[in-house]
Amino acid sequence: MQKVILYSAFLTLVLTLSSSFGNVCNSCSAQSSFFADEVSVRKLDKATFKKKLKELNEAVNKQPKSSVPLLARASFWTSQGRYADADADLKEAFRLEPSNAATLRAIAFNLAASHHQIDSYKAYTIALKKSPKDSRLYFERGVVAVHIPDLEKALADFEQAEKLGFNEPQLFYEKARMLCSYGRNEEALAELEKLDGKQLKENRRLLECRIEILLALGKTKEALPVCEDLIAFKPGISCGYDNKGLVLYRMHRYQEAIEQFNKAITLSPRATRLYMRRAAAYRKLNRNKEADADLAKVEELNKQKKDL
């Protein structure tokens, strides 16, 4: 009887929130990197969209009493930023199989991805009652707790996820990121150091996070080789050169910093922060005309953004 009441309350929660999905943001960039990666909108061209949707519709029609094809179509809707459509499929999947762990997780996940963090946390709690040993559910609920924000709940969930065997790099990244935001940088660094060298060197976010933490701790010399690792891993993007320039600036090696900012600007010519950082380095060398030119470029780029 208690389970029936619990799932009935869960369905009420989903039905109540369904009307809000039409107005949510289509981008998860403001959220945790985990949700940004998992539910980032990747719009398909019209022909591909129609073909994929036709296949999914046929699968749903062939198995009208199964939640599996509905969950697949809901995932597709979410990937296209169609949250209201995803919500409708999730409600129907829940109606068909209210105790299906995959359905419960999908509902909780989509609430989180759509910025309904408190309701998502409650939904994950219900999902965990069905699957109390699911380490990934603890991890995902922990990410939601970070954004509520509730540090203690997040830490408890991350620790439980790790205890149950969830050892993906994203766990240590999210935990380090959260601890860093609370100024607990030594603990944050210790989390990243649980990973082996290969894992650290082959993940852009882990590298950037480690640089940020080392700089916060004043360990600029230790941050420099991490910047080199980032450049080696992703030589075609600006962030490695930007980070290296920032580290060199902190070490008072201003000319070398400028050289790195030059490389970063070549790769990201519209990133205003790069011109501002290079201007600061120029000022340190009393190259004021060049600094003024960079600041003028910042104004120009900002004006162009406003005019768009």
Image (spheres, rainbow, N blue to C red):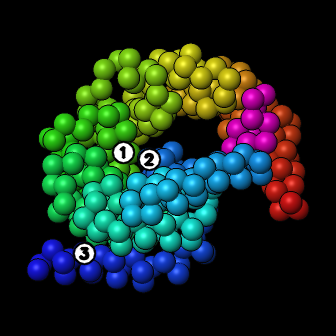
Residue depicted at x 12% and y 78%: 2
| Crowd rating for badge 1 (residues with CA inside 10 Å; few <14, some 14–19, many 20+) | many
User: For the residue labelled by badge 2, is the local secondary structure a helix, a strand or a loop?
Assistant: helix
Q: Earlier in the sequence, mark 1 or mark 2?
A: 2
- The residue where tag 2 is placed is 34
Instruction: Look at the picture and state if 52 lies above or below 25.
Output: above
Predominant SS along the magenta part? helix
Q: Which amino acid does label 3 sit on?
A: Tyr
Q: Residue 7 carries which label?
A: 3
Q: Is mark 3 on a helix, strand or loop?
A: helix
Quarter of the image where the C terminus is located: bottom right
Residues tagged 1 and 3 counted as in contact (Cβ below 8 A): no
Q: Residue 300: horizontal and vertical position, in percent?
A: 87, 51
Q: Judge left or right: residue 152 versus residue 79.
A: left
Number of the front mark, 1 or 3: 3
Give the residues in magenta: 265-276
Could you tell me if the residues under marks 1 and 2 are in contact, i.e. CB atoms within 8 Å?
yes
